[in-house]
Image (spheres, grey):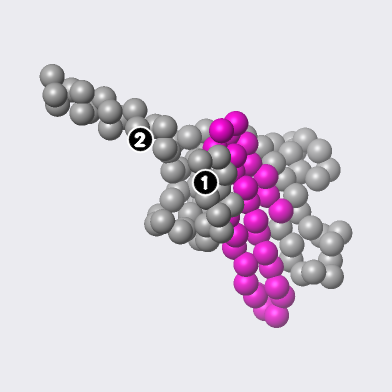
Amino acid sequence: MKTLLTLFVLLFSSSVVANDFLCFETNNKDGEMEIVNELLFKKNSNNKYELSFPDYPENGVQTFDIIDQDNKHIILNLSGIFEATAYSFNIIINKDVLTFGSASLITPFMLDNMELSYGFCNKL
């Protein structure tokens, strides 16, 4: 009986504090998207998440830093320089209502090229 109770507590607690999310990008700055993208967020350490695209495994994995995290939100960032061009990708996941939003900027002088998107998530 004690073993069963322990197993139940572990299963319940792991589903409540899920660290991994499968998200579906349904809208961008132009409105509803024709093709819904799947985004898989897997926590690989206390301060990193890996983002992959299950439908496009050839795109590989991108590692995001956790900028902030509390009981309600996770804020992720990936930024750097590629071929003399700066980029910044930011994602916020709302763990309560299971939604996410993202903004990406390739260079500060090209605001018209800024990408915005949002959608919903499932806890894994």
Q: Residues within 10 Å of mark 2 (few under 14, many from 20)?
A: few
Rendered residue at 70%/80% (across/down): 84
Q: Amino acid at mark 1?
A: Asp
- Report which residue position mark 1 lands on: 70
**In which quarter of the view is residue 24 placed?**
top right
In this view of the protein, which residue sits in the foreground, 80 or 2? 2
Of labels 1 and 2, the one closer to you: 1
- Does 13 sit left or right of 77 as displayed? left
Magenta stretch prevailing secondary structure: strand
- Report which residue position mark 2 lands on: 14
Task: Please state the extent of the stretch shown in magenta in the rendering.
Answer: 76-103
- Does 10 sit left or right of 88 as displayed? left
Give residue 9's position: percent from left, percent from top: 28, 28
**In which quarter of the view is residue 5 placed?**
top left
Between disc 1 and disc 2, whose residue precedes? 2
Rendered residue at 47%/58% (across/down): 48
Whether residue 1 is situated above or below residue 21 in the rendered picture: above
Q: Is residue 92 magenta?
A: yes
Whether residue 38 is situated above or below residue 46 in the rendered picture: above
Give residue 10's position: percent from left, percent from top: 28, 32
Give residue 35's position: percent from left, percent from top: 69, 38
Q: Residue furthest top?
A: 1
Q: Residue furthest bottom?
A: 84
Q: Which mark is residue 81?
A: none
Q: Residues within 10 Å of mark 1 (few under 14, many from 20)?
A: few
* Mark 2 residue element: helix
